[in-house]
Image: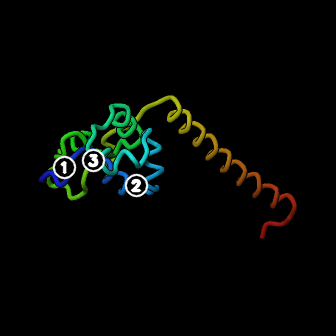
Amino acid sequence: MENKFTSIKDRVVAIAESQDISKEEFFKSIGMTSASFRGKAKGTPLNSNAIVNIITKYPEVDLYWLLNGVAKDRNSDKVGIVEEQENKYQIACASCLEKDTVIKILQQQILDLKSDKEDLKSLLGLKK
């Protein structure tokens, strides 16, 4: 894949355009303003904090592409987006594990409530 963009800031703008939020919101989320991507400011380097924010908040962005303009997967037609196989990477964190435990408990409670509902219908003679 050829480098379609001339600078890292052009690639950041491409990432912003690929998101489901406005460019202004994207730039704010990485700690910058849209003014940094226009006019003479567009020719200045991107600060390292913005790069850290991009790769932290938008993990689907191919860091290699962001930094040098060449995608690791040269056959990918999606610019700057890492194509990952399903379940290739699993994030194991305390809050994720806790969430899964809560979901299992709630699912069991739903089943118990459905059973109780049927028992009550039967006791009240409402079951057909």
Residue under the point 16% across and 46% down: 70
Q: Which residue is mark 2?
A: 19
Asked if disc 1 and disc 3 are in contact, CB closer than 8 Å, the reply is no
Residue under the point 81% across and 60% down: 122
SS of the residue under disc 3:
loop
Q: Amino acid at mark 3?
A: Val
Along the line of sight, the residue nearer the viewer: 39 or 51: 39
* Mark earlier in primary sequence (2, 1): 1
Along the line of sight, the residue nearer the viewer: 80 or 101: 80
In percent of width and height, residue 92 lies at 43, 32
Q: Quadrant of residue 55?
A: top left
Report the Cα–Cα distance between label 3 and label 2.
14 Å
Q: Which residue is mark 1?
A: 6
Task: Give neighbour class at mark 1: few <14, some 14-19, many 20+ (Cα, 10 Å).
Answer: few
In percent of width and height, residue 80 lies at 26, 49
* Mark earlier in primary sequence (3, 2): 2
Whether residue 36 is situated above or below residue 53 in the rendered picture: below
Quick check: can you spot residue 84?
no
Q: Which residue is mark 3?
A: 82
In percent of width and height, residue 26 lies at 43, 48
Q: Nearer the viewer, mark 2 or mark 1?
A: 1
Q: Amino acid at mark 1?
A: Thr
Task: Give neighbour class at mark 3: few <14, some 14-19, many 20+ (Cα, 10 Å).
Answer: some
